[in-house]
Image (cartoon, rainbow, N blue to C red):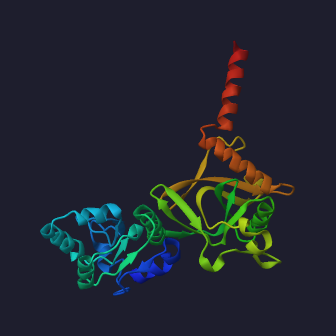
Amino acid sequence: MSTTLTSGDIFRLHEQQLKLRWITENNSQNPVIRPEDSHASPRPNLIGYLNLIRPNRIQVLGETETRYLASLDNDILQDTLKQLFADKPAMIILACNTQATDEFSLYAKAAATPILASPLTAKQIIESIGFYLRTSLSEKHIQHGVFMEVMGLGVLLTGPSGIGKSELALELLSRGHRLIADDAPEFFHAAPDTIHGRCPELLTDFIEVRGLGILNVRAMFGDNAVLGDKQLSLIVKLEHSDNGQETTLDRLGSTQRFYRMLDIDIPEVVLPLAPGRDLAVIIEAAVRNHVLQLRGYNAAQDFISRQRKMIQENKE
């Protein structure tokens, strides 16, 4: 995300969702992210409740904060307002349609800080704008493939160009699963240990299939066939099958593979292509098996344990 994100951008992007309205309209070009922020340590908080110790670039005041300010003696209130606006926050958002006093508005005008209001709670405002800032500013990774939701999990189909990823995606769509992004899904940290994927705006709803060209999945399959965002849970890598490779495959599946993306290990399944294989069914089975592994069950280890037990019983 460019450092040119402004208070006006935040208003434009969240006006309808948060029902924002301007109380003052001065300086809608205030930067939410300053050029010096990238070198600051610690980095400033971008949004949060009223904070005078480590000021947020977007300060949100709810009913609790408004009552607190109203309860202060005049001298203490003056010092508090001076401290609040000393860092020149990018914007102030008043939650629950609380009203700004004339004195509060004068300090905001002097600091060139715009004031906005919303009928939503401070918690809702912070969660909504905070999520946007986290996802927009986090490190991005573009991975060639098709990202889909299969049985509730985010599954990335990867493999060489022309191997049939889009055709497989169409088969999965016809079985009721959902498309997130074709060709160039964008992955980012939604949390320190969680990666989410989404579709670049230009490619949203579209999928390219060799021989058919560009298809609009939403128009063909309906709104429910497209999903905007999903956590990445599993990677399925498609490979061309050959005689030399078949002998190296782990037929028991006792060794789990991982693909490292954005410093996180994502479980990976390798599927060799071969005539007669119904890959859509196999991928559904892979997802079901992954869910079992998340619950602590490993079919290969269960089979090996059963085999060892039988061998031990025969020895006895």
| Residue at the (15%, 65%) spot, across then down | 73
Q: Is residue 289 above or below residue 305?
A: below
In this rendering, the count of numbered labels is 0
| Most distant residue in the right direction | 276
Q: Determine whether, in the image, residue 174 is placed left or right of residue 82.
A: right
| Residue at the (68%, 37%) spot, across then down | 300
The answer to which of 226 and 286 lies nearer the viewer is 226
| Most distant residue in the left direction | 75
- Work out whether residue 286 can be spotted: yes
Q: Is residue 36 above or below residue 235?
A: below
- Work out whether residue 249 can be spotted: no
The answer to which of 152 and 114 lies nearer the viewer is 114
Quarter location, residue 223 = bottom right
Quarter location, residue 1 = bottom left
| Residue at the (71%, 49%) spot, across then down | 286
Q: Determine whether, in the image, residue 75 is placed left or right of residue 291.
A: left
Q: Position of residue 24 (x, y in %)?
A: 35, 84
Q: Position of residue 60 (x, y in %)?
A: 35, 68
Q: Determine whether, in the image, residue 137 is placed left or right of residue 195.
A: left
Q: Is residue 203 above or below residue 127?
A: below
Q: Position of residue 172 (x, y in %)?
A: 77, 60
| Residue at the (74%, 59%) spot, across then down | 177
- Pick the quarter of the image with the C terminus: top right
Q: Position of residue 245 (x, y in %)?
A: 73, 54
Quarter location, residue 103 = bottom left
